[in-house]
Image: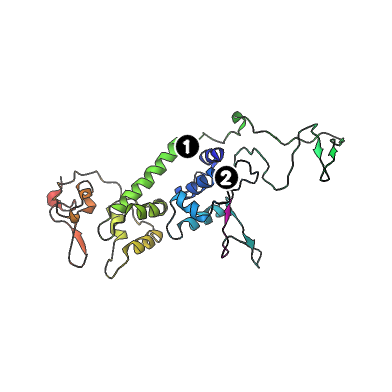
């Protein structure tokens, strides 16, 4: 298991990576063969395994993360073949795409990545292709700088520019952001609410789009994602599309002081206990599934404001 490469992700991966992109690098790093100088993953590690390890099981979510990594210069896919136009092909019917761990900027390379490159230490006897041992040839001029053949000491890693980032500070924040996105999706009003597996698959995209477009996981986002419910049959599919097409938030209001939630009436939100702590869930529905704020306990009802 490539523990070293998992640590390289934490230490050297670009700070602007999304949680989904970072999870892809971690999953590939921990499944990289330690004895492979090309940093390729195990033969059985394919797209299905990668999707399962990262939780990016939603339609197109893994493909999108891989394409974004490639645009950042961190191509992890090994081309299956080359098309007529000379471009590499990563999807060919009947064949599985393989993966390799990319070279990260600032990463201390412990072995040559290029195929066929051979390194020898000074005075080492080298074997020719025909099997005869050959002593090192005398060279004129200054000797070339030898390539390191042993892993450098941890203290020899290049110092990053600027103050070092503590991965223990950023990773928990990303994990909390994903956890908040999952909870948000599971607590959407009926019929938009989703189960834990679907919420986990959508959470990375929701976290990325809210950060990019300036949204918060609040009542306004609930209203935006669940608007115009008339005629919709597959709410989960429409929710996924709306998350991917989330527009920029216009005129984002300043944070308002938190008000004390009025007591929950116990009957709205189809009796879901989560409505006790989530005011946005306090909705009542007519026979057609249309929602409106509960007049008894919804926080927007001024008569109940604290």
What segment carries the magenta color?
A: 91-99
Q: Residues within 10 Å of mark 1 (few under 14, many from 20)?
A: some
The residue carrying mark 2 is 32
Q: Is residue 93 magenta?
A: yes
Q: CA distance from mark 2 to mark 1?
A: 21 Å
First reached walking from the N terminus: tag 2 or tag 1:
2
Q: Which mark is residue 167?
A: 1
Quarter the N terminus occupies: top right
- Does residue 287 lie above or below 217 as drawn? below
Identify the image quadrant of residue 81: bottom right
Q: Secondary structure at mark 1?
A: helix
- Image coordinates of residue 41 in percent, x first then y, are 58, 48
Give the label, 2 or 1, closer to the camera. Answer: 2
Q: Residue at x 15, y 48 (%)?
A: 264
- Does residue 128 lie above or below 297 as drawn? above
Q: In this orientation, which residue lies closer to the viewer: 152 or 39?
A: 39
Quarter the C terminus occupies: top left
């Amino acid at each position: 298991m490539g523990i070293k490469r998992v640590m390289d992700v934490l230490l050297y991966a670009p700070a602007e990576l999304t949680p989904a992109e970072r999870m892809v690098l971690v999953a590939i790093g921990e499944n990289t063969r330690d004895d492979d100088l090309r940093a390729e993953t195990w033969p059985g590690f394919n797209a299905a395994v990668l999707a399962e390890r990262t939780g990016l099981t939603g339609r197109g979510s893994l493909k999108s993360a891989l394409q974004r990594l490639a645009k950042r210069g961190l191509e992890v896919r090994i081309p299956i073949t080359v098309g007529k136009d000379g471009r590499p092909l990563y999807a060919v019917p009947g064949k599985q795409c393989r993966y390799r761990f990319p070279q990260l900027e600032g990463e201390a390379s412990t072995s040559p990545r290029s195929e066929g490159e051979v390194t020898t230490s000074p005075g080492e006897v080298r074997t020719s292709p025909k099997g005869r041992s050959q002593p090192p040839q005398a060279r004129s001029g200054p000797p070339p700088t030898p390539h390191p053949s042993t892993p450098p000491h941890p203290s020899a890693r290049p110092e990053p520019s600027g103050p070092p980032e503590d991965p223990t500070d950023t990773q928990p924040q990303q994990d909390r952001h994903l956890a908040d996105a999952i909870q948000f999706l599971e607590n959407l009003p009926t019929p938009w609410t989703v189960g834990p597996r679907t919420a986990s698959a959508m959470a990375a995209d929701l976290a990325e789009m809210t950060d990019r477009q300036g949204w918060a996981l609040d009542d306004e986002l609930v209203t935006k994602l669940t608007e115009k419910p008339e005629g919709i049959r597959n709410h989960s599919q429409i929710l996924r599309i709306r998350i991917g097409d989330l527009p920029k938030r216009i005129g984002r209001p300043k944070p308002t002081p938190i008000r004390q939630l009025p007591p929950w009436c116990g009957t709205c939100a189809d009796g879901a206990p989560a409505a006790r702590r989530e005011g946005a869930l306090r909705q009542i529905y007519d026979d057609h599934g249309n929602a409106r704020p509960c007049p008894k306990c919804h926080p927007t009802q001024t008569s109940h404001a604290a």
